[in-house]
Every structure is written in structure tokens, then in C-alpha cells.
Image: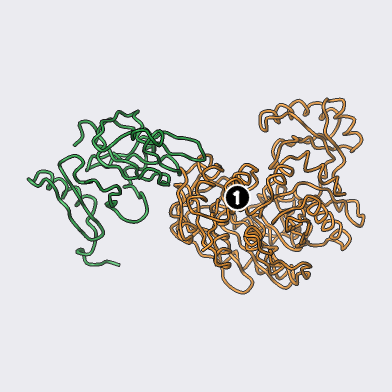
Amino acid sequence: MTPPPADQPPSWNELLDLVARLDSSPYADVELDLPGLHLRMSTAPGTAEGDSPAPAPAVPAQPPTPPPAEEAQPAEAGSTTAGAQLVDVTAPLLGTFYRRPSPDADPFVEIGSEVTADTSVGIVEVMKMMTPVPAGVAGRVVEIRAQDGEVVEHEQVLVRIAPEGGL
Amino acid sequence: MTRVLIANRGEIAVRVIAACRRLGLSPVLAVSAADRDSLGARLADRALCIGPAPATASYLRPELLVEAALAAEAAVLHPGYGFCSEQPALAEMCAEHGIAFAGPRPETLREFGDKGSARAAAVRAGVPVAAGGEFTDVDQAHEIARGAGFPVLVKAVHGGGGRGIHLARDEDELARVVPVAASEAQAGFGNPALYVEQFFPRARHVEVQVFGDGEGGVVVLGERDCSVQRRHQKLLEECPAPGLSPATRELLRGSAERLAADVGYRGAGTVEFLVDTEAGTDPATVVFLEVNARIQVEHPVTEEAYGVDLVAAQLRLALGEPHGLPEKPPEPQGHVLECRINAEDPWQDFRPSPGRIGVAEFPRGPGIRVDTHVTADHLFPPHYDSLLAKLIVRAHDRTAAIEAMRGALRATQVTGVATTAQLHEHLLAHPDFQAGSVTTRWLDATWPPQQHRGGEGDTA
């Protein structure tokens, strides 16, 4: 079971290296297809997502198999994706994710919203019981991964945040 | 395809998945974060992670289980055993959301979940109960105890699981334990109500498997003997129960059938009894203990003895189909044993032994069944109970079944965690067990062996 290296997805460290190089390069937008991985980067907030309501997750298949470094952190506090310096805010339990406090209200956050650790990024509803999901970290929302009204699983990534002083 | 949400984990999740496959149903498993990579999660068509590892935040939350069933668009929820399986709240929530609960009606769960109302239901159905009754003050306790005869047990009316039980050998001891038991009952079960009943120091635990159609029709599938227990935890079970007279068997089966029919019992259930053979009467003294309103851990011994699939029958009934069990099951030919292989160290007071499993080799061959969720390299989590595998063997008679089980245990190899396999080898080699009528207190007197040579000859 040792396929040639060319067929393997890049390792985490290789990926970090790649991101760092692209980051210091003059490209504003980058989109790459690698074995087992689709990478999309942008220096302009929001543009990588465009207006498409459901951005294709960068990693296909089941929700999160988070990198081992994240394991120790409580789900609500979010988990730091070390090199990329984005924080995943994940669902504390299975339920229906709502981006707004009520159907006609504005969303809790949008891409580009500035948040504090206590800012709610959404709520997860289980049998009429509402559990607010705090950002867990101060920063800026750069990605919204779960749609309004979607059933989310425990530890599924809801939004991603670039922490203050991070990037 | 009709979907079934399995609201449980471990070997029973794997067992329910097998029943789903048999019936052409699509199994969806609710898992905690600790069970994402479990065998059940791999075998199911889909696994939904409902919450973090601690059961209080996942498997013990009815609302998460029902939410998962709705997310999966499941027609049926199977609760397994333990966790929420006997929680009326789960059964009710399923009903509210149009999901069929593969278990008894909520009111049945409520009635049998309370020792007082369970005992009353037994009395109504003409089922023998231990002499005794509820009391409100110490004087009344003494009066009832004198009527029942010492020794007596003082139990919490709302208790369960072998907790909050006190033995009183005489009047002085009774006066001492009543206030202790009352405060324990208040602290443990939120209600100080107590009752006192006759104690049988040398009794066997024998239970009857029933299956009700929900409309008063009841199939009785014989008895299991589960007397090999450590502190009320069963370790080894067999079917049929050895050495009971036809009259005792008839008393047990008739009692269980009447009770189940009386409440219009729906699905699989177990009526537990104590059988006291001391007095030498025929039938023996039989008293009602409780009803387990769910599939039980030890159901495979009945399945193997009678050639039935109880879990498939539960699912069929929940889907509104006939359960498919024989109305009058033929008496089993042969004998079936089950050994619970737990991740516990029997040499260290049964201390739980979670960890990374190395090798996991189980026996194969005629008459051998292994129900397990454990495979090589599995991380056995510390958050839940310690059941690792159930070895079930069937042979033409009890002696042959004991021999077959000893062989099966020798062929079992699990590394990385301590297991109870060695304890079982010791028990099966013991002349008391081979003689076939040990009591519920036998194991505590037998293990650990006097000399650590684990052979015959070391009787207590």
C-alpha cells in the first residue's frame, strides 16, 4: 500500500509550506487541484467565496476529521488550524443550524463580520431547544460553511474565523 | 428504502445493523465523537455524530437521538439496551414526531420503571412476589418485616440497578438501616419511599423471555439462568436454565405470560425472578424481581436455543408487520451458554481496562457465535460500559456446551486490554458450576480463587 508519491495528497506540512509561498507571492486569487485536495486562496475578503450560497468544502466527504492538534480544545471554543491561522467554529451538538435569531432577522454574522469571542455566529436547535454558538475567538469571519436550516453534526465546521492579529 | 435510526453503540449497535440487513432496512447509527470510527459506524449506511464522548451529552439525550432520527428520515428508532432504552421520554418524543419506537409503549416503560408500580402490576396478574410491602415509618417497617420473616431487604421504591439495597438480619439492624436507606433513596432517586421484603440468601436468578404483540398476544421463549453475577452484574448466562422441575418452569412461564398479557406488552421484554430451591418444594419458591422492558444483553442465548431473531422481530413489529416469531415455540434441543468478555481486570477487583486493542482473535466453528464491536487496533473508549464481546456457544447438552465454551475461550485472544476471559475459564472448570445450580452469591465467594492456580479443587 505505497502508491507513488505523485498520487498522494500533500502532507500537512507540505500544504503549510505551499500556502506560505503563495501568500508571499503576487497572486490575488489561487485555485489548485491536487490529488485528494482542492485548494482555493484569496487575499481579498469574501472574494474566494463569491456569492455562491454553498461553497464546495475544500475537503470532500464527511465533516471534520480535524488535525490531531485540535483534539484537546473544547468544541465551542473553536479550534485553531495551526498554519493557515483560521479558527473553525464547530457545532457543539447535532441539530438544525440557524444563521439568524428569527426568520426575518438579519444573520448573526456575514463574511467579513468582526466578532469577539462571545459573538454568536449562529444557533443550533434541538427539539425547540436553542444552543447559541459563540465565535470563541475575536477576529473576522472569512467563511460560512453551514447553510441556514441545515442539519449539522457534532463538531461540524459552521464558520471559519481569521483571528485578530492572526494572518 | 426504509431507514432505522440506531440510538446506541458497541456490540448492540452492530447487532441491530445485522437485523436491519436481514430485513432489507437501511441502518443509520447515532454516534458520539468517541465512536466515529467504531465498527458500527463503518457497517451502517450512515453515521450521524450527535455530540461529544460523555454519554450525558450524547447517548443519554433523547432529544438528540430523535433529532438524528428526523435528520436521517428514519421510520423506526431502535434504542438497544441501557442508555435511553427504557426512558419514557424517548418513546414519547418518537411518537410525537411520527417515528416508530422499537420497544414498549411509554406507559409500560413508566409502569415497570418504578418498583412499586411494577410490583403492583405483578400482584394484579397473579404473579408471586416476595412477602413484604411499602412502609411509611419504622414501626410499620418492623411489622412488615416480622410478617415476612428475617432476614429482609430494604429497598428504594424508585430505585433500580441493584443500588440502594440494604440487608437487615434482625430487628436491631432494621432500625439502623431504615434511616440510612431513606436518605440514600432521597439522594439517589429523589424520593425517600422504601419497602421491605423477604430476603432469599440462596436463590438463583432465572428470567423469562417474552415477546408481546401489543394487543395481549404473548410469545414465551423459555428461561435463562443468569445466576453468575458479581455485585448484581451478570457475567455468564445460559438457556435453558438447568435443573428446574417442569412445575417450576411452568410457574415461571405462566407468571411471565400473564404479566405481559395483562399490560398488553409490546415487543421484547424479560421478566426476572428469584428461584429458591432451598425448601425442596415443587414447584420451587418463585418471586418476581422486575421487568426489563427492552432487548437484553443476554438475548443471544435465547435466540440460539430457539432459532429466532428477536431484534428482527422488534423491527418488524415497529414497522407494523407481524413479528414473525412462532406462536408456540418448540422446546429447544441442546444447551446454550454465553460468556461476557469485559475489558476489566478480574485480578484487580474488576477494574475497567480501556485502551488500544492490539490483537482481537475470536473463535469460529460449529455452534459458535461472537457478538462484538471490537476489531484489531480498535481504541476501546473509557466513557462507556466495559462489554467487549459476547461468546455464545450451542451444543447438544450442557456438558458439551461447557466443553465447547472452554475451547472457545482458549481460541479467544485479545491483547492491549485486560479481559474477563480467564475468569470464565475458571468458572467453567469449577465443579459447582458444572453441577448446574449456583446461586447469585456464588461468584463473590468463588473469585478470586484461594490459590491463584485457577484449577478445580479450590472450593470455598
User: How are the colours assigned in the image?
Assistant: by chain
Against B138, residue B57 (above or below) is below
Against B66, residue B357 (above or below) is below
Q: Which chain is green?
A: A
Element assignment for label 1? helix
Image x and y of residue A164, in percent = 23, 31
Q: Is residue B125 left or right of residue B166?
A: right
- Residue ID at (15%, 42%): A43
Image x and y of residue A138, in percent = 28, 30
Q: Is residue B369 left or right of residue B33?
A: right
- Residue ID at (15%, 41%): A44
Q: Label 1 sits on what residue type?
A: Pro
Q: Which chain is orange?
A: B
Subunit bearing disc 1? B
Front residue of this view, candidates B236 and B159: B159
Q: Tell me the crowding category of disc 1: few under 14, some 14 to 19, or many 20 or more residues within 10 angstroms, Cα based.
A: some
Q: Is residue B127 left or right of residue A162?
A: right
- Residue B351 can be seen in this image: yes
Against B44, residue A66 (above or below) is above
Numbered label tally: 1
- Quadrant of the rendered structure where residue B133 is? top right
Front residue of this view, candidates B204 and B383: B383
Residue tagged 1: B346
Q: Residue furthest left?
A: A26
Q: Residue furthest front?
A: A104
Image x and y of residue A159, in percent = 31, 41
- Residue B425 can be seen in this image: no
- Quadrant of the rendered structure where residue B144 is? top right
- Quadrant of the rendered structure where residue B427 is? bottom right
